[in-house]
Image (cartoon, grey):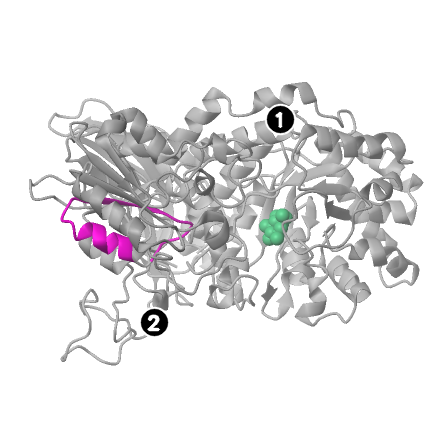
């Protein structure tokens, strides 16, 4: 389904459910609030200057603009080069990255601007993935807020801090679709859904870039990794990818197109091969789709040595061939492999690469440098750097972001009849146990840019502040990996002395999540499962906080632990956000952006799957198969098909009741919808309105993310059982009912059909307005010819 564009606008009208209708308020969808103006790369003044530069540049100087090196802490295998000063002086370098302070940036910039022949400034990049110094939750956590405005604001803070250090280019957002929890980089993504991923892609780009790239605290975004990287076979990082064009266009490309439409100045080509053709030398995706179909004007940067890796992929037998294939395949800039530097000029001289193509790539690089205002303001004011970091409002936002990212997975009633969470402030003694309870470094998550462990307030610190040291029994219980019997015994003693136990378990952020961190086992590492079972055996009420960059397969925990919260890696304000959530100052409202598996064998696992010809239908898939079940259906014999928790799922301290969805029409015409798509109104016009009443039946105010799903049947190609096509995070007072209305746009009904076109076809349509991807009852309508 074509989720490239904004599909639904939302109208909320609110009434208190015990009263007659009092008022109707109308507001547009959250997704529509994002900044709509986008920075332009086409300034006629700059174009003239760029042409003048091209006249003056030697071939080597042109190639220099297409060369990028890491001059700081490496984030990939080394290239062996260190003579950057000299190369910059000779005009042989266009961009540097992995430098993190204004002083270092200025030092390199001075060489480029004051000592090179043409004085062209360098562009400085960095992986600012979820914050620069003020670290926010990892992107998987940020997306779990289902709040694009929050994400946009977090990206703004990151841009403000990064630019104060002279970094004007971030290698973010990661807009890869992640359907497989084995893949460590799921942590960096916005999850498995193309619609949500597109909304988040736009939010990041707007947050980083604002409306003008030359504003001193705006930075250029880089949508990555183009494309299919998250579909690595077996979830093993860098592995090969096979995707049909339909899946590519319906699932993997939409967030990239959303980023491009939002004005992303740059894009990064991926490491993986896609249907046999490495993504960093793939003219179909880089030229046909990106340039021709989408009109992308910015820079395509390679990933770290992905140009050189064409040799390992087997499509080039030497560095020169790799440089030629990557460059002609559509990669403008070579990150870290040095092969453009070594071979591109010679390839032009031998006629294998047209110089016009080099000129075009140089234009793209210079356009971004002009757009950022680097020619006028190449230096960064070092005296202002420190003050830009960790500002009070930035920390407040980091706390809010963490609070909104938590997903309450389970909250069972304890024998006194009440759910275990929120905890009462009257609780006499709390045992805080686990290797992540007082761990500053891991709270930062992977890709923590300039984040420092000492900036993190841990759960232990925040809890001590809340309760005082006397009411807290702390024991780390075990290490994330490793640990001893004595540690476990000490933790059991602490639990026995307490009224409630908070267990902080999970993964090690830099080692087990992020790049090159795929896992074949998704349980708790080390002795943590053993610790968990020993603590639960004390009979004390246990709240389990799971710190991870992905869902973990913990069926035992979900059966035996009364309360479980997915906390991801929450960033610098981890402790305060957790304490406020645990004690009910904040009502959790995060929802899963990935399907949570029961077992690794279910992966890849995603809700928007096809039905198959032999769906398991009415069989109760929550229990193992029994005699009498139909055998020849698509299921496991030893495991339900269903996830532990579905995409879109998340509990709250309130309860929400959903009414039956109602549609404003029971018929639509495919012809009329296609006309609107052709005329360009496919993303904004209303095709039909879907509404439902949602009531907060609990006793606390809360925020509920209400989701709109669509299914099409009777079409020329098989389509998913549900596709997310809209959502809204709505605040509901206790007892309040809101009528939530989604204005569904024509493109919600379009898909890549059997003629290889995005179009609407006659179909039976089911529409759900539901709390997650697997519940609720649908309303139907018909699309006629
Ligand atoms: C990663 C990219 C990152 C680059 C530069 C690569 O290894 O795949 O996501 O932007 O390094 O650090």
Residue 154, position in %: x, y?
48, 32
- State the image coordinates of residue 21 (x, y, percent, origin top left): 17, 26
The kind of secondary structure element at disc 1 is loop
Position of residue 1 relative to residue 444, above or below, is below
Q: Earlier in the sequence, mark 1 or mark 2?
A: 1
Locate the N terminus and report the quarter of the image it occupies: bottom left
Q: Nearer the viewer, residue 589 or 99?
A: 99
Which residue is painted at 18% across and 34% down in the image?
Answer: 696
Residue 25, compared with residue 769, is above or below; it is: above
Left or right of residue 614, residue 251 in this image: right
In front of the other: 762 or 695: 695
Range of the magenta residues?
A: 530-552
Q: CA distance from mark 1 to mark 2?
A: 50 Å
For mark 1, does the 10 Å Cα neighbourhood hold few (<14), some (14 to 19), or many (20 or more) residues? many
Q: Residue furthest left?
A: 416
The magenta stretch spans residue 693? no
The reply to whether the residue tagged 1 has its Cβ within 8 angstroms of ligand 1 is no
* Residue marked by disc 1: 217
Q: Quadrant of residue 699?
A: top left
Q: Position of residue 26 (x, y in %)?
A: 32, 27
Residue 413 can be seen in this image? yes
Residue 705 x, y percent position in the rendering: 31, 40
Q: Residue at label 2?
A: 612
Disc 2 packing (10 Å; few <14; some 14–19; many ≥20): few
Q: Nearer the viewer, mark 1 or mark 2?
A: 1
């Amino acid at each position: 389904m074509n989720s490239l564009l904004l599909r639904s606008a939302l109208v909320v009208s609110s009434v208190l459910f015990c009263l007659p209708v009092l008022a109707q308020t109308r507001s547009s969808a959250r997704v529509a609030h994002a900044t709509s103006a986008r920075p332009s790369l086409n300034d006629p003044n700059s174009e003239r200057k760029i042409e003048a530069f091209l006249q003056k540049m030697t071939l080597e100087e042109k190639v220099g603009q297409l060369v990028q090196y890491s001059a700081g802490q490496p984030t990939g295998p080394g290239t062996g080069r260190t003579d950057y000063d000299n190369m910059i002086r000779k005009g042989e370098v266009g961009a540097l990255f992995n430098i993190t302070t204004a002083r270092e940036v200025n030092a390199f910039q001075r060489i480029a601007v004051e000592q090179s022949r043409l004085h062209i400034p360098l562009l400085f990049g960095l992986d600012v993935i979820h914050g620069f110094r003020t670290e926010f939750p990892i992107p998987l956590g940020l997306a779990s807020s289902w709040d694009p405005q929050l994400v946009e604001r977090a990206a703004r803070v990151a841009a403000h801090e990064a630019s104060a250090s002279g970094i004007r280019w971030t290698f973010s957002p990661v807009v890869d679709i992640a359907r497989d929890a084995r893949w460590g980089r799921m942590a960096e993504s916005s999850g498995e859904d193309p619609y949500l991923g597109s909304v988040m892609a736009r939010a990041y780009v707007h947050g980083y870039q604002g409306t003008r790239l030359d504003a001193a605290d705006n930075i250029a975004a880089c949508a990555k990794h183009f494309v299919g990287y998250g579909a690595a076979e077996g979830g093993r990082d860098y592995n090969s990818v096979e995707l049909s064009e339909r899946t590519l266009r319906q699932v993997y490309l939409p967030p990239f197109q959303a980023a491009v439409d939002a004005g992303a100045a740059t894009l990064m080509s991926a490491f993986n091969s896609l249907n046999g053709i490495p993504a960093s030398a793939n003219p179909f995706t880089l030229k046909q789709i990106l340039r021709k179909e989408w009109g992308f004007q910015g820079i395509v940067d390679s990933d770290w040595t992905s140009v050189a890796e064409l040799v390992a992929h087997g499509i080039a037998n030497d560095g020169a061939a790799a440089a030629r294939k990557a460059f002609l395949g559509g990669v403008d800039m070579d990150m870290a492999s040095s092969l453009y530097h070594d071979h591109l000029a010679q390839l032009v001289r031998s006629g294998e690469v047209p110089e016009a193509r080099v000129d075009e790539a140089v234009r793209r690089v210079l356009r971004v440098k002009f757009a950022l205002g680097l020619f006028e303001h190449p230096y960064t004011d070092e005296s202002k750097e420190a003050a830009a970091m960790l500002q009070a409002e930035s920390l407040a936002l980091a706390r809010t972001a963490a609070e909104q990212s938590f997903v309450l997975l389970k909250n069972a009633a304890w024998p006194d009849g009440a759910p275990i969470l929120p905890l009462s402030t009257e609780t006499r003694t709390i045992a805080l146990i686990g290797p992540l309870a007082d761990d500053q470094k891991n709270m930062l998550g992977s890709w923590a840019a300039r984040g420092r462990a000492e900036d993190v307030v841990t759960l232990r610190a925040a809890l001590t502040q809340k309760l005082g040291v006397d009411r807290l029994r702390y024991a780390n219980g075990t290490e994330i990996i490793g640990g001893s019997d004595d540690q476990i015994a000490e933790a059991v003693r602490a639990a026995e002395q307490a009224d409630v136990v908070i267990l902080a378990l999970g993964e090690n952020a830099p080692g087990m999540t992020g790049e090159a961190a795929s896992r074949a086992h998704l349980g708790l590492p080390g002795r943590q499962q053993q610790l968990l079972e020993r603590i639960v055996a004390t009979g004390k009420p246990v709240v389990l906080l799971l710190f991870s960059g992905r869902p973990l397969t913990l069926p035992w925990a979900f059966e035996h632990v009364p309360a479980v919260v997915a906390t991801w890696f929450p960033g610098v304000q981890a402790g305060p956000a957790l304490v406020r959530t645990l004690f009910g100052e904040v009502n959790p409202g995060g929802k899963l952006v990935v399907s949570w598996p029961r077992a690794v064998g279910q992966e890849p696992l995603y809700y928007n799957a096809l039905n198959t010809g032999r769906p398991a239908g009415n069989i109760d898939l929550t229990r193992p198969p029994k005699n009498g079940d139909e055998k020849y259906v698509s299921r496991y014999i030893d495991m339900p098909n269903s996830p532990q928790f579905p995409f879109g799922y998340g509990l709250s301290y309130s309860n929400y009741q959903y009414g039956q969805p109602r549609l404003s029409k029971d018929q639509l015409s495919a012809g009329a919808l296609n006309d609107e798509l052709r005329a360009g109104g496919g993303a904004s016009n209303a095709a039909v309105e879907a509404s439902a009443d949602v009531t907060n039946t609990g006793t606390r105010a809360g925020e509920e993310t209400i989701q709109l799903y669509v299914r099409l049947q009777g079409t020329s190609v098989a389509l998913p059982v549900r596709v997310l096509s809209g959502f809204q995070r709505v605040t509901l007072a206790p007892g309040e009912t809101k009528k939530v209305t989604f204005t569904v746009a024509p493109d919600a009904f379009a898909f890549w059909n059997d003629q290889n076109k995005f179009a609407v076809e006659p179909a039976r349509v089911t529409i759900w307005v539901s709390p997650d991807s697997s519940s609720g009852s649908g309303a139907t309508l018909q699309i006629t010819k």
